[in-house]
Amino acid sequence: VMPGLTLVLGLPCSGTDVLAPLLASRTPNTQAIDCNQLLDKELERKTEIGLTMHSMLAKGQVVPLSFTMELLKGVANLTSSDNLVIENCPMYVDQIELIQQDFRIDRVFYISGSDKAVMSFKEQHMKNNPEDQQEAARSFNERQDRLPPIVAYFSRLGKLEKLEVSEVPKEAKLEILVAQATLPQFAIISSLSPVIGGKQAELICSAYGLVQPVTSKTLQ
């Protein structure tokens, strides 16, 4: 059985680092992982993967996603986790297919900021990287350009939960947004014809991967 993933999407400094552990704490046997930090720790520890990464970076090469996937599988096995909540992955829309070869993507949470919020995200990101403001601005803008197709992909699948914020969210605010997003959802079909109504309900169930609709008969 493939281990499950919950993805946390958002711009730098949008609160993904707060949201990921918050989501993990709501589900037993679940770990929150920052994929950027996961790779950085391998470099620091000078493991076999870390040394290979160091050599690639020294040559100006890009570290492939397969390294991140191997490390995530290692975390899942080591901690016997049923599910991982990850941030900073995927970074490109074409990486989704590669992720799905090793993991089952269950849910996706996206912190969507207003224009004012995005400005505050960027300001904080620049403050966090004072040594190279130009690079900080470039990396933020690139992430801003890459996010929409990733968000659109999961939205089409019905897996996306959008958390809308107007400023950098505190943990208490995110708790409220997550609680609202995870409330049970219902689709109510009302028809004068039990036959037509039943068929429509079955079509909707099929579209959302459900077994069968709940009707007055099934409740008896």
Image (spheres, rainbow, N blue to C red):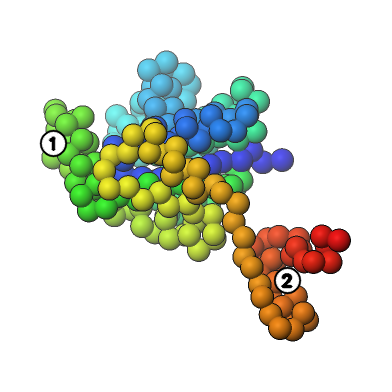
| Left or right side of 90 for 146 | left
Q: Can you say whether 198 is above or below 14 in the image?
A: below
Residue behind mark 2: 202
The residue under the point 27% across, 53% down is 114
Residue situated in front as seen by the camera: 31 or 190: 190
C-alpha gap between disc 2 and disc 1: 55 Å
Query: The residue under label 2 is which amino acid type?
Result: Glu
In which quadrant is the C terminus drawn? bottom right
Is 80 placed above or below 179 here? above
Task: Please give the residue where the numbered disc 1 appears in the rendered image.
Answer: 133
Between 168 and 129, the one lying in front of the other is: 168
Determine the residue positioned at 13% across, 36% down.
Answer: 133
Label 1 secondary element: helix
The reply to whether residue 51 is visible in this rendering is: no
Q: Where's residue 141, x and y in %?
A: 23, 49
The type of residue carrying mark 1 is Gln
Q: Measuring 38% from the left and 33% from the top, which residue is drawn there?
A: 171
Between residue 170 and residue 152, name the one nearer to us: 170
Pointer 1 local density, CA inside 10 Å: few below 14, some 14–19, many at least 20: some
Q: How many marks?
A: 2
Q: Earlier in the sequence, mark 2 or mark 1?
A: 1
